Amino acid sequence: MNTTLRAHLALLLAMILWGSSFIALKITVNEMSPMIVIFLRMAIGTVAFLVVWPWLRHGFVYQAGDWKFLLGMVLFEPCLYFLFESQALRYTSAGQAGMVTAMLPLMVAIAAYFFLGERNNLKQWIGFLIAVAGVIAMTLTGENSEQAPNAILGNFLEFLAMVTAVGYTLLIKHLVKRYSAFVLTALQSFSGVLFYFPLALMSDWPSQISLSTMGWLVYLGLVVTLGAYGLYNFSLGFVKASTAAGYANLLPVFTLLFSMLILGERLTMIQWIAISVVFVGVYLSYERRSSIPKEVPPGITG
């Protein structure tokens, strides 16, 4: 299996994990403060990384001047991104929040055009637009839910999260050529603990945490934080930033499916058709031949 195909499979798995994270976040923020949820999530991920750090640290050799890129990376994600997203899920449903992520591929493609000089062919642009059209169709045909008390505010906060995701993707695209993808993910977790610790202290802690909520927190900290971010960061070493972001069109699909399976939400026939349209759009935007130099980032083996 060549590295480009592995990168695309990593992206697909990352989207599945991120799609499920909306459900996990929605459940946990209903029981405790979003700041506590994110802090515990980062703390669990950090503990896991500390266990394997003796092996990971060999992939980190600091290069002069990179502090500003590393600082920008952790500021965008996890700091600002989760700040916006956790608050968004207090006001909107997991399904609608997932739909807002459809803006990410076009936003990244435009930003990558100006800042990275990336070019996409006409078929890829058509694929982006078809996928967005499918997501818009899912949005317009969705029914109101009691889980979205202020959907407009919640969706706007999720949009701000997507703005930070654009900056994060561009910075990771640069940094993954110089550092191991999983070392960068570890730095995100460490920084997230430092950033959210004072915010968590100022929040009202629950008298007790249910076993199911603790399970979701462990899932967010281990599976999503380590797995999804590690896979996404890995993929950016082999595909264009806009191509990787194009997979975000699958987030609304997976989020809706998980919402249906776990939260009991139901999809209409039109929404199922819209989901099929999204998959067609992602397929068209698939990059058949990588334009990334075959230089393997440090710490990543073929």
Image (tube, rainbow, N blue to C red):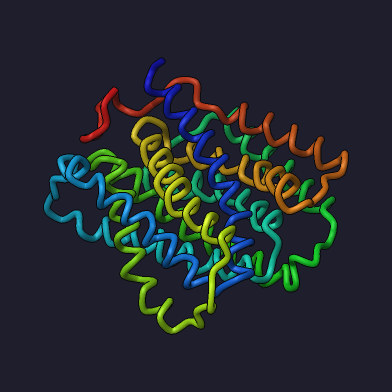
Whether residue 113 appears in this view of the structure is: no
Residue 221 pos. (x, y %): 44, 54
Q: Compared to 3, does 266 lie above or below?
A: below
User: Which quadrant of the figure contains the C terminus?
Assistant: top left
Using residue 255 as the reference point, say whether residue 236 is left or right of it. Answer: left
Which residue is at the far top?
A: 1
Residue 73 pos. (x, y %): 34, 57
Q: Which residue is drawn at 40% across and 65% down?
A: 79
Which quadrant holds residue 195?
Answer: bottom left
Q: Observer-nearest residue: 165 or 49?
A: 49
Using residue 257 as the reference point, say whether residue 235 is left or right of it. Answer: left
Whether residue 288 appears in this view of the structure is: yes
User: Which quadrant of the figure contains the N terminus?
Assistant: top left
Q: Observer-nearest residue: 173 or 203?
A: 203
Q: Compared to 37, does 241 lie above or below?
A: above
Q: Residue at x 84, y 50 (%)?
A: 141
Residue 152 pos. (x, y %): 71, 69
Q: Compared to 234, does 69 lie above or below?
A: below
Residue 184 pos. (x, y %): 29, 48
Using residue 150 as the reference point, say whether residue 51 is left or right of it. Answer: left
Q: Which residue is drawn at 70% across and 61% down?
A: 93
Q: Residue at x 81, y 35 (%)?
A: 273
Picture mark count:
0
Q: Observer-nearest residue: 53 or 142?
A: 53
